[in-house]
Image (cartoon, rainbow, N blue to C red):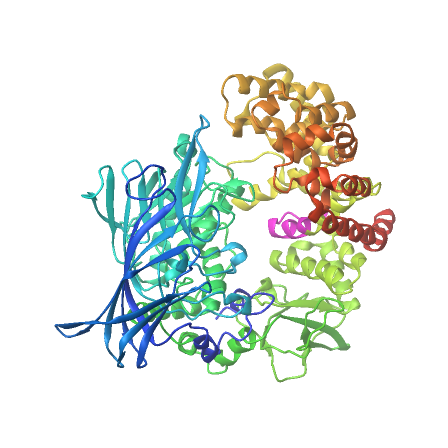
Amino acid sequence: MSMRLGGYLTWSEGLGGLSDMEFANSLILNKTFVPSHYDIELRVILEDGEPAGEIYTAPGATRIFGDIKTPTSKLELVAYQYQLDIVKESVTVQTKNGNKSETVNVTEVYTDSDGNFTIHLGRELEFGEELEVYVKHIAQIKRGSGGLVHLSYLTETGEGRRFATTRFFDEQNERPFDIQAWRAFPCVDEKQITALNRGLLNIKSTFDLTIIRKENYTSLSNGELVSSTPDPKYEGWIIDKFSRTVPITPSRVSLLVSDFSHVSFTSKQNKTVRVHAPQHLLKNGGGKYAAEIGAKLFDFYESYFNTSSQSSKMDFAVIPKLPGSVESWGLSFLPHKIEDVSLLLKPNANFKSKLLVDGKIAESLARQWIGHWWNDNYFNLGIVKYLKYLGMEAADPEYSVLPQGTLQKALQTYVRKLTEEKGETDPEAFFQMLQDAAGNDHLNVSSFMHSWIDQVGYPVVKVSVLNDSFVQLLQEKFKVSEEKDLNQNSTWEIPITIFSEEKPHLENTTLPQFWLKQDGDQLSLEHNASDWIMVNYNATGYYRVFYEDSLLNLIQQQLEKDPSLINPLSKAQLLDDYFVFAEKNDGDIQTALNLTKYLYQETEYVVWRTVLNHFGQFDRRFSSHSAYSAFQKYVNNKLNYALTSIGIDDSPEDSTLRKALRSELLRWACGKGEPSPLCTAEAKKLLESWKVNGTSSEELNQPLACAAVAIGGKEAFVLYQQYEKLAKGNGTKEQRVNFLGPLACATDKYIVEWLYNSTIHENSTVVRLDDGKFILNELILKPHGRRQLLPFLRGNLDKFIEHFNSWNQPKPLWPGSWREGVATFMEINKGKLSISQSVDRYSLGITQGVEWMNSTGSIILEWLESV
């Protein structure tokens, strides 16, 4: 079994005892009446003057079917009083016994501001009685809150369009914040329990949903559309009925009423994947890639689990300005953009953008088999991440990072059991399935799993020299310096793999050679102390590794001699560990930096991506400081060698990861202040080419264009002329910003000043087409632009407020963008800028930045001057 699994089964903060099923049971609001099925009808009203009801309301009715588990004379449900009006006189309760039914007298219906909805009855209900509860209700469709919400978007012509959707659960940061189905219909559900940071054991039911909508809209829900018929009550209305769901919780019921269009693809197994979005976003192939890759991944997961999905379709609704994903069975709501990459990218998009889309679609589809509707949080969060990366590998085999085998066999068995038992099973059963699939009598899977999921955090394995012939391994909990930890003596069952100068490659990369036991003290291994040794081959275990200085020096010597002898993932872990130790654990930042000296020989994407993630923090802090040139000179030197080695232009023979590496290196070498020597030479060629051939949005290499602007000054202003042509010729925003973005790389003081002014002058094309926010953000992200932010604000504050004061959290207010002078200026003008509550927080960020510069920053600068 792959021991990397431990990393995917836990947050770094820990899951806090998810195996405690008694605790999970205590979270259920009501165990007296347990529903098995809901029939829900909702009429979604999005227009004014409708005889069917008021705008932004959803009149409807719910039938709840279930059993009595404990004798009672009252039924306890939930309904949020401030958003869901219960029609009390409509409430009826019937019991069923075979073919006989009885109407039970309802003596009182009680609702309160806490969300309690209690039905008092004229007699006591007995254990095992089957009930049917009927309730009419009117839900409010609020803007941007939980429950049923109404949103809007602008068409290409600026016309506003409304749509309604459910927001019962928030996937942002992969942590639920509230369960809000009770705002749309009465139900039995949990209320705001996730602050406990525990697993969710939910009452699951099947759902039949009927949506009534105007004929100029369409509707979506978890199930497949079964029928659409005219509403006999109101002309121009349509009744849409959807197929029954698998057992899910009320919070996973989803609907969308909109005028969206869609693109679709059918998998080889005849499953349909549709991507829905406003029509203008689907033009010219928008959404086609997501639908196509979704169909491909549908086939992959069905094959992987050896179990067909219980849904014949998957709908992805891409919602403009949605802050986070809301994923459920059969229907997921996704944000339009992730990391500034549109989920509706076209089939010819670059590989990096495709990787982001692959990951999001893979994660959503994996949840059709292992999702939040299951009980176990390590399935809900951990294994879904693992399956996401397997899906990305299926989408592009070059993105191969994870082992398979034992886990797949256990998951196949477990998913079949979940299907047969309607989503309810014991975590211990899964551990036993892993045990059976592994066929290893020496590994107690249950003990191993509990050591990882029942406590917070993760370990550090410390490697030291015992003598000339032995090294010693011991474990301790990783913690941030000065962190108070009541469980600082936590230990884990840790799988250990060793590779060394004598044996740098392992045949079986995932099978542990040794174990650091949870109840053991240390592990001694035979090794020649004059040779390098490393722990955690291919980073398959979820732990960090700290080496004694003499051992680390040997590893560094090997890296500088021949880095190819050490596998890429292990190099990436080594670098990441030591930067994290320096940042969080009182480690020495110079030790981490010493490990980067060899990078001019490095051509592996995963290593560079890891290093640049950490260098990015230094780049942001140094960019407004005199030390920036020294930092950039060091980084550019390494980038130059690496780019020379792999070439600056893509080739048809290049792998996906090679293209990703080139893109990342170019972004740093050409797009950060002064370009590297290689970028400068290529940028000069590009400037000459523009003079002869002009420019084209499709052919514009953004990093090289940035370098051309940085060195070319006014010669590069041909990009703005092209922007103006696109503006006059109705070019799309995407095409326009392709030319605006590189202009922010200008180093000439007067050009930067002109660009700033273009964001606020009413006659400017930038302002007229609402591109000002984009160019302003781009300027602030660049060192030369940031240096002129304060003069611009001082001279144009009133106009800036007029254009941007309603802009939510503009990047000028980000701590990483501030210099001390800007912070002081904002403090003085916080009343005008309507940011009074933010200034103190951001000023604290400035103070912390100054402290960092005086401590860590000065150490880095001293090191840079010495190399």
Q: Position of residue 600 (x, y in %)?
A: 72, 46
Q: Assess whether residue 424 is covered by the magenta stretch.
A: no
Residue 807: x %, y % from top left = 61, 37
The number of callouts visible is: 0
- Where residue 466 sits: x, y (%)? 76, 78
Rendered view: 286 above or below 490: above
Q: Which residues are magenta?
A: 599-613
Residue drawn at (64%, 34%), measured in percent from left and top?
Answer: 804
The image quarter containing residue 452 is bottom right
Q: Quadrant of residue 812?
A: top right
Nearer the observer, 555 or 238: 238
**Residue 579 visible in this rendered orientation of the protein:** yes
Of all residues, the one furthest to the left in this rendering is: 99
Q: Is residue 158 above or below residue 484?
A: above
Residue 534 in sight = no
Q: Quadrant of residue 709?
A: top right
x, y percent for residue 721: 62, 17
The residue lying furthest to the top in this view is 692
Front residue (pair 177, 445): 177
Please say if 108 is above or below 676: below
Q: Is residue 607 magenta?
A: yes
Q: Is residue 228 left or right of residue 596?
A: left
Front-lying residue, 435 or 797: 797
Query: 571 or 276, which lies in front?
Result: 276
Question: Magenta region's main secondary structure?
Answer: helix
